[in-house]
Image: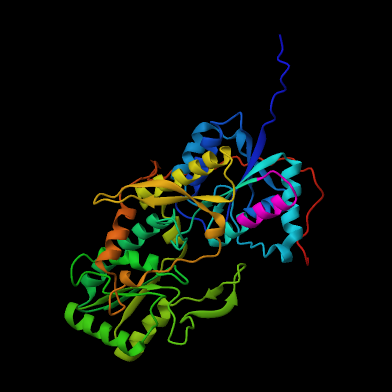
Amino acid sequence: MASSRSKAKVYNAFYAQSGGVTAVINASAAGVLETARKYPKKIGKVFAGRDGIIGALQENLIDTSGESVAAIAGLKHTPGGAFGSCRYKLKSISQSRAEYERLLEVFAAHDIRYFFYNGGNDSMDTANKVAQVAAEHGYPLTCVGIPKTVDNDLPITDNSPGFGSVAKYVAVSIREAGLDVASMASSSTKIFVLEVMGRHAGWIAAAGGLASEKAGQPPHIILFPEVAFDPEKFLARVDACVKQYGYCALVVSEGVKNADGKFLAEAGTVDAFGHSQLGGVAPVIAQLIKDKLGYKYHYAVADYLQRSARHIAAKTDLEQAYAVGKAAVEFAVKGHSAVMPVIVRKKGAKYAWEIGMAQLSDIANVERKMPANFISSDGFHITAACRRYLLPLIQGEAYPPYQDGLPAYVQLKNRAVKKKLAPWTAPGK
C-alpha cells in the first residue's frame, strides 16, 4: 500500500572554484562531491560551474553525477581546477544586483538550493552577498564558503588550504637551489633570488625560511611585504652574507614595497579584482645587487609552479583541503548558511587540528598579514615562533600515482547540463 505522505523533494547543489587554483583545491572538490553523494535524501545532483562563478552566470553547468567514483577520488591527487576557475569579482549588491539576481534565476531553473564557493577573501565576500540577496528575495539558498588560498591570508582559520603545499615547494626549492649556488659561488654566481607569490602578506616568503635551520643555510635573506624595503640596509646585509658565506640566497615576496608604500615591481595595471598587477620583483632586486655590489646573479620566479606542484604537496595540506570540502556539505545539510569551515589548531606540544565554523561576514574581505612577532627584529628572516607555526603545515608526503615516469592525473568528463534560460550578457557589454 502506497504511503499517503508525499515524498520530500530533493534539491541540487552548485559548486564553483574561484581565483588562483592550488595543488589541492581539487581535493576540496572531492570532499564536496564524495560527501554530497552520502546524502541522497538531502542533495540530488551537484552541478559545477564551468570556469567558476562565470559558469553560473552563463548557465554553463557541469553535471558531476556522471563521474565515476574512481574519477572523483582521483581529484585528490590532481592539481589545477578540475572544472575551471576565474578571476571575476561581483561588486557590491547595489552595483551588481542584476548579476546576483541572475545567479538566483539560474539556481531556480535547475532546482539548486545549495551553493558552495571555493576560494579566498573575495570569494567569501561573494558567497556572503549571494546569501544576502537570496534572503532578500525569499529564495531558500544555503550558502557555504570553502577556504582556499596559497597566500594564507584568510582570517579566523589557523591556515588556508593550499598554503601548506606551496610552503613546502618554496622551502624545498630554496634549499636545493642554495646548494647549487654554494657549489659554484667561488668562481661564478654568488647571488640567487627566488621570487614567490604574496601581494600584501609574506606567508609564502616566510615558508622559505624553514629551509634555514642553522646559521649560514639558505635563504640568508627574506623580503616581506610587511617590511618596507631599505636599499642601503639590504645591500649591506647582502654584502655581509657573501663575505661570510661566499654567496647569498634570497626569497623575495612579489609584494615588497618601498618606504612610500609603492610596489618595487609595480606594472601599472590591475587584475579583474582590482589588485595591482606586479611585473616581477626578482630582476629588480637582482639588478640592484649587480649595479651596487657587482655580484653575478641568477633569479627565478616560482609563479604558477609553486601553486601547481602537486608532486610535492604536503600531506597535511591535502587532508585539510579535503576536510573543508567535506565539512561544507555537512554544514549545509544541517541548515548552516553564510558560514565557512575553518581549521582550528588544537593546544598542546604535538600538532593537531580540527574543523570549526566561522561566519562569512567575519571573513569577507579581511586580509591577515604576518604578525610582527613572526618576523625577525632586523626584518630579514623569520622567528622561532614563526617556524613553530609553519613547520607542521608542510609535514607529510602525498605523492600522486606515476605512469611512464610522469604523474597520472585525472581529467573529468565535464558533461554540460542543458540550458533552460536565455543567454546572459554581462552588464555594460
| Residue 98 visible in image | yes
Residue at image location 75% in from the left, 50% down from the top: 137
Q: x and y percent of residue 66 in the render?
A: 61, 33
Residue 377 location, quadrant: bottom left
Closest to the observer, 208 or 113? 113
Residue 223 location, quadrant: bottom left
Q: Is residue 68 magenta?
A: no
Q: Please, which colouring scheme is shown?
A: rainbow
Which quadrant, please, contains the N terminus? Answer: top right
In this rendering, position of residue 4 left or right of residue 415: right
Q: x and y percent of residue 305 in the render?
A: 43, 60
> Which SS type dominates the magenta stretch?
helix
Residue 45 location, quadrant: top right
In this rendering, position of residue 331 left or right of residue 323: right
**Residue farthest toward the top in the current orientation of the protein:** 1
Residue at image location 67% in from the left, 41% down from the top: 113
Residue at image location 44% in from the left, 48% down from the top: 356
Q: Is residue 129 magenta?
A: yes
Closest to the observer, 325 or 58? 325
Residue at image location 38% in from the left, 81% down from the top: 285
Closest to the observer, 87 or 114? 114
**Magenta-drawn segment:** 128-141
| Residue 294 visible in image | no
In this rendering, position of residue 399 left or right of residue 127: left
Which quadrant, please, contains the C terminus? Answer: bottom right
In this rendering, position of residue 83 left or right of residue 92: left
